[in-house]
Image (spheres, rainbow, N blue to C red):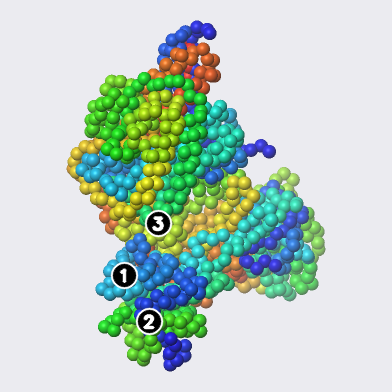
């Protein structure tokens, strides 16, 4: 159902829950493995979604430093929750994968067919993270079909607005949905971002979007920007971190930091990986596999003779400096998208925005 | 040609030469596909079946896709590589990383300072200079080793020493019977060797503290900051900047190194546990 | 045959769980002493439990024995729950039985195939047996694996499961999660039935144990996770009276305590369980027991291997039944502490396992008492060995040693358990 | 070709760790073809004299006799792998290190004088040099196979010294501390189990002992916030790795 008068010329539609179900159905019919939010183990996690009933209707999230609770919402919104424990990294950069195998016949790359993913409900911060991850890993695989969910409900730990990655999704999506529940019912403004997205929308039952739908959606998203739970200091973070290498502040973080690595694991852009060599008892068949690593692991910087970064302070400094500072040097952009996962999922609630603010204060506000 | 960055290219050990009690030089010939040509200072990831893969510098660059690596046995993987006998097949990925900027030294003095196994990555640079001898003024090689028996390439050292147009200074920490050469750390000869400081390009490779002291000595003698290159070492697993292990501040050493200009390296080397 | 004195000493009894030694001293035709030495160093569990929180005994006592940790967890849960006035029933109880079935399958399969069968077939050990009859041992390992899969699925892992708590579990599986397990168990049932057929064909010396046998008997079903102690003499008593009937005393040569039942030698374990509960077997188990020539009772310790095999069939069938009837319950019921004493009796693979805890009003353990199967059996085993050796003095030391070891393995003693075992010495005088 | 010899030894323990070897149902027979079992009483009466290429040692040292025995085993073993919480930190029986053994003896035994035991339960490393340590109460099957397969090819075994949290996250589990307020020792506990407890909605209780550099003081406030009182905090560290220095 294509409406030709939308801004990008591709057409906006308004879907109801049946329309969303049809969208999931159409993606599945096209052979996509649709991944989206589902309620599992007291959290909104990412898993295969077969129909709209799998979505966490009516569940919201209260998050804080080291704290995450799902809660019942007063409505039945399916995207009314902020970031959960997982990110799309789990699918684009799996926590473990075989790289090569070696046997008497030589070296082989495993030829498992790559899944044809469709990501349902990705936020602006997530989409920014997908772009960063793809850049760093120079991914050449199949790009997922992205159905974005515009963020109208930022959480207590969110700060995408200050990282300039959200709340509005501006690119990197095929279809963007803005969910709204009011007197006129439960509906989604669907805008296509690519021809593939437009083609998909054209197959769905829905009505054409009117001016009013678009205005409401835009104002909902704009309002979200003002409701971010956190802000990153408005300073040159790259310079701040470079100037803070010898700061005594790292020691104060180290007192609190467990060096457990949770922040790196939940971060949607943290890409570090360790290679493992696996052999069977015969030794004839060997494999090299890769698993998520963390700069908090003592072996991470291991050299013959010992690890470079043994203190907790140096390991926290490495992480935060890389996220906010040296990522710019290495990849020309920030490593942080402001999703707040590291804040919520740090068991002791260490807050990257607060630590950046503390470093800023220590340098008199001017790195 | 390997398309997947993780796919090693099979090479067969053609020759193995024992250098010292724990080091050996392997000459590797491609089994089928060749890797692109290495430049002095670059490294390869060498894979021993089932044991693992580690970064090893190119230590000579003959023609025909043949690779030469000198390996010191320190752990399981380096031990397996070190003991690979002729006929054995190893996996190789590369070339990776930055190279010694031999061109920049043209027209001036070239000083190479090696500590221990650090001579291996510098040998191709020296060979290059000797092949293009007329492009350089004075060429000096300073080599430090723990004991005389730890010196790599002893025949070659003697050969270079016999050449009129290269100065070779060898020093050992601990002398052994019959050793008539210098005893002491490598910084000592640096303080006294003839040097046209402002026109000198120095390439340093060895343990980090050694490189720091050498750099300080050279700067003290007036060698410009930007005239010094160092080869840095960190844990490396991918060689392609996607594993994150080799970070040193802003640098991904497998990509932005191992060879780094001193002005970039100094502030980083000075930070503890960076 | 000479009438000299001799001493037989088996240091490091093999193919038993834990380590112990056997010492036999004879003079002429008389056996002067048989000592099952348990040199398992003491670990003082009952002492270190004092002052612990009432929720801790299941995890702590599991560490008494790596062979039957579920048994310890179950008896501990039952005892503490008893003290707190809580009874776990319905689907949660069924899940506990399922977990326990896993341990029976795994523990029995290990004993049958790797430890006991080689004795009957003349192999020095299961590894040598595997070299000759690989597919047979593979079948045993597959069976064992099925048991371990059950424990991993329900308990989180096979040894010292992490998912057991007072009142139930930390997390209960969904019915869908149990489906692959049922697949594996259906294959295991065939293997278990084949095992009974295989072991029932072994040669068994004629021998009936003269002792009383004691096992649990429940209102329905073969006893696993609960029941009332019954004795072959026909009497029974509630678990709370266990310590007034079963009295442990210390013997100088052992770190395991010896026990008597009303002053008499007695045995717990598969023979006892079967002899007191053969009417309670599941259909296939009952059928294969009959086909294997077992009557209503089995008193021949050598035939314990057949009984174990029948019990594996039972455990597999029971596991399948539980899975078929499964409806996901809430993971646990609350167990609030109160001052009091609780008793827990369950059937470990090696026999009745009794726990008793006394709690204070704050929920701390004031005292703990644990009576494992092996320490109940040890005196009777020594007595049996005395008779066995008396009748076999004509054998040379090597043959006699072998006979004794085999006899000991009949009881599948678990030395680790008898925390409070084997090295055979025969002193012929 | 001469197969390498494998010996398994038991000290003060529950047998669970050595049973783990028998729990490798799919690999056991293959392993039996790759090594010669030179000493493993639990499965075989065949006992060969040393030297042994690999010795696997379970259990802690709690008697004078064991002090002597571990020295002789070390002397006969090329590679010594110690397995389990007992062997790596003293095990649950190390709780005696904090109490009075004489009194412990009297609680359990009527005539304590007949019972020989030392006042402390100590890890193997307190007596001899060890080559590899496998943590856990009990050890993880895959880690045991990893050490054995690595030994057979001459590789370094991959036994990451990191937190249980890293395994928890790699499995995609939801953190029970953050999402449920359940106290969890995962952030200070050595990896290796694959995050078994969080997978059943339970907080890790530290059966793999402390990871290197465990920041225990930083975890205490979290445990308190999750509802543990002082007694519970003390007790949770005083279990299967009670005598590990970081936790004691
Ligand atoms: C750019 C570069 C060039 C090198 N060139 C040479 C050379 O020409 N000849 C030579 O003998 N050695 C060289 N090394 C050092 C060599 O890589 C290490 O000695 C080797 O990795 C040790 O691995 P191992 O498994 O034998 O020892 P272990 O100490 O057991 O190491 C275990 C693992 O840690 C990592 N690791 C340990 N030490 C280092 C290290 N120094 N650098 C990077 N990763 C490490 C590896 O992943 C290794 O597999 C070079 C290192 C780098 C970074
Ligand atoms: S650093 Fe933290 S806030 Fe930033 S992207 Fe990573 S997890 Fe999100
Ligand atoms: S549940 Fe425990 S182990 Fe898992 S991430 Fe949370 S704190 Fe770490
Ligand atoms: S999560 Fe912790 S307590 Fe549970 S098995 Fe793993 S290490 Fe042991």
Which residue is depicted at the point 81% across and 61% down?
A: B163
> Mark 1 or mark 3, which is nearer to you?
3
Q: Quadrant of residue C245?
A: top left
Does the CB distance between marks 2 and 1 fall below 8 Å? no
At numbered mark 3, what does the secondary structure look like: helix, strand or loop?
A: helix
> Mark 2 or mark 1, which is nearer to you?
2
Which residue is depicted at the point 44% across and 58% down?
A: D171
Task: Identify residue for label 3.
Answer: C176
Most extreme residue toward the bottom is: A5
Q: Which mark is residue C389?
A: none
Label 3, residues with CA under 10 Å away: few <14, some 14-19, many ≥20: few
Q: Is residue B184 visible?
A: no
Task: Identify residue for label 1.
Answer: A59
Provide residue C193's location: percent of width, then percent of height. 47, 38
Q: Which mark is residue A15?
A: 2
Which residue is depicted at the point 75% across and 52% down?
A: B87
Q: Are marks 2 and 3 on the same chain?
A: no
Provide residue A315's location: percent of width, then percent of height. 46, 61
């Amino acid at each position: 159902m294509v409406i030709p008068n939308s801004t990008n010329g591709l057409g906006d539609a308004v879907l109801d829950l049946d329309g969303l179900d049809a969208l999931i159905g159409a993606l599945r019919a096209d052979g996509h493995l649709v991944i989206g939010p589902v309620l599992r183990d007291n959290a909104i996690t990412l898993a295969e979604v077969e129909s709209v009933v799998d979505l966490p209707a009516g569940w919201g999230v209260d998050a804080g430093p080291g704290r995450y609770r799902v809660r019942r919402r007063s409505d039945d919104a399916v995207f009314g929750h902020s970031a959960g424990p997982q990110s799309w990294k789990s699918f684009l950069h799996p926590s473990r994968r075989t790289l090569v195998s070696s046997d008497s016949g030589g070296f082989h790359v495993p030829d498992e067919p790559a899944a044809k993913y469709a990501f349902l409900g990705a936020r602006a911060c997530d989409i920014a993270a997908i772009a960063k991850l793809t850049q760093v890993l120079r991914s050449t695989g199949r790009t997922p079909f992205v159905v974005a969910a515009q963020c109208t409900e930022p959480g207590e730990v969110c700060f995408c607005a200050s990282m300039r990655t959200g709340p509005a999704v501006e690119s990197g999506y095929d279809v963007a949905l803005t969910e709204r529940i009011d007197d006129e019912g439960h509906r989604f403004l669907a805008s296509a971002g690519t021809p593939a997205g437009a083609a998909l929308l054209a197959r769905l039952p829905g009505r054409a979007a009117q001016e009013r739908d678009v205005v409401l959606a835009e104002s909902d998203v704009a309002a979200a920007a003002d409701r971010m739970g956190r802000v990153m200091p408005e300073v040159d973070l790259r310079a701040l971190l470079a100037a803070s290498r010898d700061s005594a502040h790292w020691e104060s973080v180290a007192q609190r930091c467990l060096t457990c690595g949770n922040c790196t694991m939940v971060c949607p852009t943290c890409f570090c990986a360790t290679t493992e060599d696996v052999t069977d008892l015969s030794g004839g068949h060997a494999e090299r596999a890769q698993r998520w690593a963390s700069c908090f692991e003592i072996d991470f910087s291991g050299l013959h003779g010992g690890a470079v970064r043994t203190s907790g302070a140096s390991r926290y400094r490495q992480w935060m400096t890389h996220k906010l500072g040296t990522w710019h040097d290495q990849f020309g952009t920030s490593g942080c998208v402001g999703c707040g996962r590291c804040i919520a999922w740090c068991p002791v609630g260490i807050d990257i925005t607060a630590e950046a603010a503390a470093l800023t204060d220590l340098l008199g506000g001017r790195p | 040609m390997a398309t997947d960055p993780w796919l090693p290219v099979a090479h067969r050990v053609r020759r193995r030469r024992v250098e010292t009690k724990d080091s050996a030089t392997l000459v590797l010939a491609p089994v089928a596909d060749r890797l692109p040509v290495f430049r002095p200072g670059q490294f390869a990831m060498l894979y021993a079946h089932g044991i693992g893969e580690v970064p090893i510098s190119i230590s000579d660059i003959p023609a025909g896709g043949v690779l030469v690596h000198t390996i010191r046995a320190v752990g399981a993987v380096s031990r397996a590589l070190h003991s690979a006998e002729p006929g054995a097949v190893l996996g190789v990925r590369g070339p990776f990383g930055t190279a010694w900027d031999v061109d920049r030294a043209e027209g001036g003095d070239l000083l190479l300072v090696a500590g221990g196994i650090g001579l291996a990555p510098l040998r191709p640079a020296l060979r290059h200079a000797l092949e293009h001898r007329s492009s350089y003024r004075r060429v000096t090689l300073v080599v430090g080793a723990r004991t005389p028996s730890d010196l790599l390439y002893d025949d070659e050292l003697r050969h270079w020493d016999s050449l009129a147009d290269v100065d070779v200074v060898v020093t050992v920490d601990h002398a052994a019977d019959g050793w008539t050469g210098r005893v002491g750390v490598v910084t000592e000869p640096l303080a006294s060797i003839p040097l046209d400081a402002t026109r000198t390009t120095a390439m340093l490779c060895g343990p980090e503290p050694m490189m720091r002291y050498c750099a300080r000595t050279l700067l003290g003698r007036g060698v410009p900051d930007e005239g010094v290159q160092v080869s840095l070492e960190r844990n490396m697993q991918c060689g392609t900047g996607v594993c994150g292990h080799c970070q040193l501040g802003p640098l991904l050493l497998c990509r932005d190194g191992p060879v780094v200009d001193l002005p970039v390296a100094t502030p980083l080397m000075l930070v503890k546990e960076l | 045959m000479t009438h000299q004195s001799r001493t037989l000493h088996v240091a490091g009894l093999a193919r038993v769980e834990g380590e112990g030694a056997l010492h036999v001293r004879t003079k002429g035709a008389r056996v002067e002493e048989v000592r099952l030495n348990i040199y398992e160093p003491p670990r003082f569990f009952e002492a270190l439990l004092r002052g612990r929180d009432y929720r801790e005994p299941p995890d702590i006592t599991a560490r008494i024995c790596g062979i039957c940790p579920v048994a310890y967890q179950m008896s501990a849960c039952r005892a503490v729950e008893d003290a707190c006035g809580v009874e776990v029933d319905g689907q949660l109880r069924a899940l506990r039985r399922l977990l326990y079935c896993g341990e029976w399958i795994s523990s029995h399969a290990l004993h049958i195939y790797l430890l006991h069968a080689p004795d009957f077939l003349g192999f020095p050990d299961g590894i040598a047996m595997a070299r000759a009859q690989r597919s047979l041992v593979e079948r045993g390992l597959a069976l064992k694996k099925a048991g371990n899969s059950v424990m991993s699925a329900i308990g989180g892992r096979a040894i010292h499961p992490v998912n057991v708590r007072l009142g139930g579990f930390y997390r209960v599986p969904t019915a869908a999660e149990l489906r692959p397990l049922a697949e594996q168990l259906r294959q295991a049932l065939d293997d278990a039935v084949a095992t009974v057929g295989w072991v029932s064909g072994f040669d068994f010396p004629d021998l009936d144990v003269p002792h009383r046998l004691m096992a649990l008997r429940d209102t329905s079903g073969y006893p696993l996770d609960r029941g009332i102690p019954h004795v072959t003499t026909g009497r029974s008593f509630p678990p709370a009276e266990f310590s007034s009937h079963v009295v442990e005393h210390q013997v100088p040569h052992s770190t395991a305590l010896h026990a008597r039942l009303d002053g008499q030698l007695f045995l717990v374990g598969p023979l006892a369980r079967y002899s007191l509960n053969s009417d309670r077997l599941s259909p296939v188990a009952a059928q294969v027991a009959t086909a294997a020539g077992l009557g209503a009772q089995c008193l021949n310790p050598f035939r314990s291997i057949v009984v174990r095999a029948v019990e594996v069939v039972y455990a597999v069938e029971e596991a399948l039944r539980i899975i078929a009837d499964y409806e996901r319950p809430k993971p646990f019921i609350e167990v609030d502490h109160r001052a009091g004493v609780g008793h827990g009796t369950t059937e470990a693979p090696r026999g009745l396992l009794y726990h008793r805890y006394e709690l204070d009003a704050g929920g701390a353990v004031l005292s703990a008492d644990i009576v494992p199967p092996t320490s109940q059996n040890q005196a009777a085993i020594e007595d049996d060995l005395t008779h066995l050796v008396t009748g076999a003095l004509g054998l040379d030391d090597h043959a006699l040693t072998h006979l004794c070891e085999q006899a000991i393995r009949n009881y599948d003693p678990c030395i680790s358990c008898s925390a409070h075992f084997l090295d055979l010495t025969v002193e012929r005088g | 070709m001469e197969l390498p010899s494998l010996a398994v030894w038991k000290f003060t323990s529950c047998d669970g760790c050595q049973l783990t070897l028998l729990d490798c149902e799919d690999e056991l027979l293959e392993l039996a073809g790759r090594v010669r079992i030179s000493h493993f009483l639990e499965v075989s009466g065949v006992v060969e004299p040393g030297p042994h290429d690999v010795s696997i040692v379970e259990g802690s040292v709690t008697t004078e006799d064991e002090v002597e025995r571990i020295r002789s085993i070390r002397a006969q073993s090329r590679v010594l792998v110690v397995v389990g919480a007992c062997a790596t930190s003293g095990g649950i029986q190390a709780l005696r290190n904090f109490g009075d053994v004489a009194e412990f003896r009297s609680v359990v035994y009527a005539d304590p004088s007949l019972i020989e035991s030392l006042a402390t339960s100590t890890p193997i490393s307190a007596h001899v040099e060890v080559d590899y340590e496998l943590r856990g109460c009990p050890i993880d099957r895959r880690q045991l196979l990893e050490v054995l397969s690595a030994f057979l090819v001459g590789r370094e075994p991959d036994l990451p010294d990191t937190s249980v949290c890293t395994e928890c996250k790699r499995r995609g589990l939801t953190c029970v501390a953050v999402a449920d307020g359940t106290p969890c020792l995962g952030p200070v506990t050595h990896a290796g189990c694959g995050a078994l407890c969080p997978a059943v909605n339970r907080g890790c209780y530290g059966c793999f002992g402390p990871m290197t550099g465990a920041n225990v003081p930083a975890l205490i406030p979290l445990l308190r916030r999750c509802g543990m009182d002082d007694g519970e905090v003390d007790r949770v560290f005083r279990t299967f790795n009670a005598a590990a220095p970081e936790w004691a």
